[in-house]
């Protein structure tokens, strides 16, 4: 058995693949949930390593979805982004604002949350605590990147 934080980090990093495995095979949902709860990293690694190609689909979560999550998180701070969201070609701007590292982290957390909800984890579980703390940290980094983007645009 591995430590809980190692298992949770592994699940987070492979959340997209594990989500698609759990979504398509209902019998493996309880096995994935048990492996996470029992901290069985070997079983989870086995799922990831032996996953067929059909489960390795590209994410639907894009950088613009990441900006939308920030807009929902910061209710009043970026009202101007909310107003221009549907007017301008915002995908290009989102690609300029958000770095790949934070986007990848946001994507992992997005699918990690979907996986936990699909597996019907209790919201008081340590996995959800970890998820919320990591989302908060990532959101703060993205907010900082948005602010830096505007500072660069104004000063250049």
Image: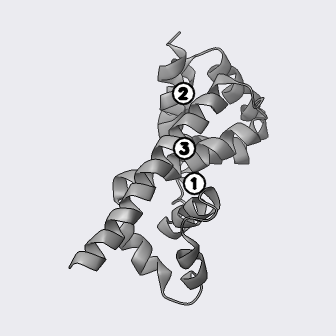
- Residue at image coords 47%, 78%: 91
Disc 1 secondary structure class: helix
**Residue picked out by circle 3:** 135
Residue 111's mark? none
Of the numbered discs 3 and 1, the one sitting upstream in the chain is: 1
N-terminal of the pair, mark 3 or mark 2, is: 2
Disc 3 secondary structure class: helix
Q: How far is disc 3 from disc 2 in space, using C-alphas?
A: 14 Å
Gap between marks 2 and 1 measured at Cα: 24 Å
**Picture coordinates of residue 117, whole percent (x, y):** 74, 41
Could you say which disc has been placed on residue 54 in the image? 1
Give the vertical position of 132 relative to 146 (above or below).
Answer: above
Q: Is residue 52 above or below residue 8?
A: below
Crowding near the residue tagged with mark 3, few <14, some 14–19, many ≥20 C-alpha atoms within 10 Å: some
Q: Which quadrant of the rendered structure holds the C terminus?
A: bottom left
Q: CA distance from mark 3 to mark 1?
A: 28 Å
Drawn side of residue 59 relative to residue 146, left or right: right
Closer to the observer: label 3 or label 1?
3
Furthest-bottom residue in view?
87
Classed neighbour count for the residue bearing mark 1: other residues with Cα under 10 Å, few (<14), some (14–19), many (≥20): few
Residue 8: image tag: 2
> Camera-side residue: 17 or 52?
17
Circle 2 residues within 10 Å: few <14, some 14–19, many ≥20: many
What residue is at 50 percent from the left and 50 percent from the top?
139
User: Residue 30 at what x, y percent from top left?
Assistant: 76, 28
Q: Is residue 110 above or below residue 115?
A: below
Q: Label 2's element?
A: helix
């Amino acid at each position: 058995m591995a430590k809980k934080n190692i298992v949770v980090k592994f699940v987070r990093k492979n959340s997209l693949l594990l989500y698609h495995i759990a979504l398509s095979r209902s019998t493996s949902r309880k096995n994935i949930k048990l492996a996470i709860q029992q901290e069985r990293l070997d079983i989870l690694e086995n799922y990831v390593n032996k996953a067929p190609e059909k489960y390795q689909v590209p994410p639907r979560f894009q950088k613009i979805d990441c900006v939308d999550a920030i807009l929902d998180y910061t209710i009043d701070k970026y009202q101007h982004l909310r107003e221009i969201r549907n007017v301008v070609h915002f995908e290009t701007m989102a690609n300029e604002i958000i770095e790949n590292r934070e986007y990848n982290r946001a994507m992992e957390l997005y699918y990690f949350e979907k996986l936990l909800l699909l597996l019907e984890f209790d919201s008081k579980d340590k996995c959800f605590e970890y998820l919320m703390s990591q989302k908060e940290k990532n959101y703060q980094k993205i907010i900082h990147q948005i602010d830096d983007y505007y500072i660069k645009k104004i000063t250049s």
